[in-house]
Image (cartoon, coloured by chain):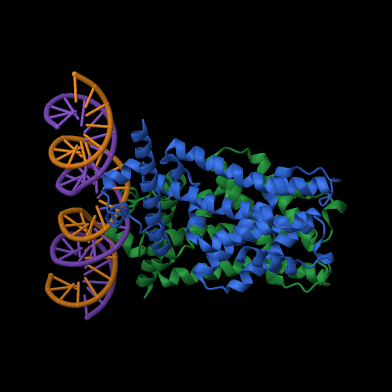
Chain colours: A blue, B green, C purple, D orange
Amino acid sequence: MATSERKARELRQREEMLLDTALEMLEKDGFATMTMDKLARRSEYSKGTIYNHFASKEDLLTALCLRGFDIQLQLYRSTRDFEGTSREKMLALYYGYYLYARQHPTLFMCVLSGQSPNVIEKTSPERIAMRRQKEREVAAICDRVVAEALVNGDIPADRERIVGELTFANWAIAFGTTALLLAAEQAYSIARLDQTSSLLTNAGLVMDGIGWHPLSDSWDYRQSWSRIQSFFGA
Amino acid sequence: MATSERKARELRQREEMLLDTALEMLEKDGFATMTMDKLARRSEYSKGTIYNHFASKEDLLTALCLRGFDIQLQLYRSTRDFEGTSREKMLALYYGYYLYARQHPTLFMCVLSGQSPNVIEKTSPERIAMRRQKEREVAAICDRVVAEALVNGDIPADRERIVGELTFANWAIAFGTTALLLAAEQAYSIARLDQTSSLLTNAGLVMDGIGWHPLSDSWDYRQSWSRIQSFFGA
DNA sequence: CGAAAAACTTGACGATTAGTCATTTAAATT
DNA sequence: AATTTAAATGACTAATCGTCAAGTTTTTCG
């Protein structure tokens, strides 16, 4: 059945194209003003066809969330080649997260609002499952860095520390800082330079709090930060 | 002109009533399903009258944000009478924030989504100003606790530390932790006990990272946490 | 190849929704 | 009591999501 395979591939390609278009509209005008009718018009397919791909507007939103996770994952995975201490590797993840949020603020917000019950209810079970899968993949990458640090002894094992707990703490400060800065930037207007600086500061506080060596008073993390920046820049 | 005063008072009362009703509907069904028509029907006023109070649905959303800030502020202010170290006082603010998010998850989310450009654009300038004002009040309460700690010497002054920076770090971890837990609770189902425990942990990490004395290895913050809990419970 | 069957596409349509505004109703003033 | 002022109303418009019967294309198979 070569034909059916080709069909499936074409469907997948069109779905990507639809998501490209939706993303474009989204990046330009936000989610509220992106309508299914406009998407139909711009993609040159009918609304019915679009509803063959997405069960609802919320299902489309979740499909975009998946893209968000993919971007995040790609950035995270690219840090594999980054050389440095375990703490620097974690810092690279922070920076990747920041880049993702900066370059795709709308997707970043989608991932957040896509968690609300109202969206989940109207999303197809398949996509919900995919979302969970990707979330797990993201968490796994952070877990790996934390686990390495625990094995190395970079994080002291004297207090009973669970990997998931430490990952969560880093995730929470990264998310909290990024989300607040992003929101503030949109609402008021905060300089971009202050943003990465705040993130570095907050990341440092949590990792110092964990006791993740080398601590910030015995290492120049501003320099690490620059190194990470040029790593991603290259 | 006693009559016009009475008029103004009646208007204000009705507005509160409308917000009560909207909040009820919101807590039950979420923002998307709360419609102005339904609000009109349930409040037994016409749509036109409702639009005399709120310039748009987004304006109503912002009015609800203001309520959220009021609840948060009330909880924060109530910690004035809480006796303890400066770090315990900050911890009490964390707990107040948690209570606010727990008891009014929808308002909590409103405050977040109410920052989006799309909402702000459609909100009346007066309410935007009120929102900013309340944000400042919340920040001021945190700032006061941080400033006290700096004066006390509970936070070491050796590194140059700015009050706003430290407030922001605490805010970011409190917000990040709470928002992620809340979202996870709604999407999957996470026990409530783990939630306050995570918040205590994360708060501890940041404050240890700041070097906020007494550090967590020389103080039992679980006990402080219980004390705060019963303080709010009373 | 050609006809029947299966799969897919389409856009008009129904049901809702945000927001407006001419009309009606109530209140205040003189 | 008449006039003026202010406020409430809900029918109406435009826009939106999602559906589905009718039409079109593609595949299958004798």
Front residue of B130 and C16? C16
Quadrant (top left/top right/bottom left/bottom right) for the N terminus of chain B: bottom left
Tell me: residue B213, above or below residue A133. Answer: below
**In the image, residue A103 lies at what x, y percent?**
52, 63
Which quadrant holds residue A135?
A: top right
Tell me: residue B84, above or below residue A127. Answer: below
* Residue drawn 61% across the image and 56% down it: A175
**In the image, residue A218 lies at what x, y percent?**
84, 65
* Residue drawn 65% across the image and 67% down it: A230
Front residue of C17 and A163? A163
**Lateral position of residue A210 relative to residue D15, left or right:** right
Tell me: residue A171, above or below residue B140. Answer: above
**In the image, residue A34 lies at what x, y percent?**
35, 57
* Residue drawn 36% across the image and 63% down it: B53
The answer to whether one can see residue B32 in this image is yes
**Lateral position of residue C13 relative to residue A117, left or right:** left
**Lateral position of residue B102 relative to residue A41, left or right:** right
**In the image, residue B28 lies at what x, y percent?**
45, 43
The answer to whether one can see residue A54 in this image is no
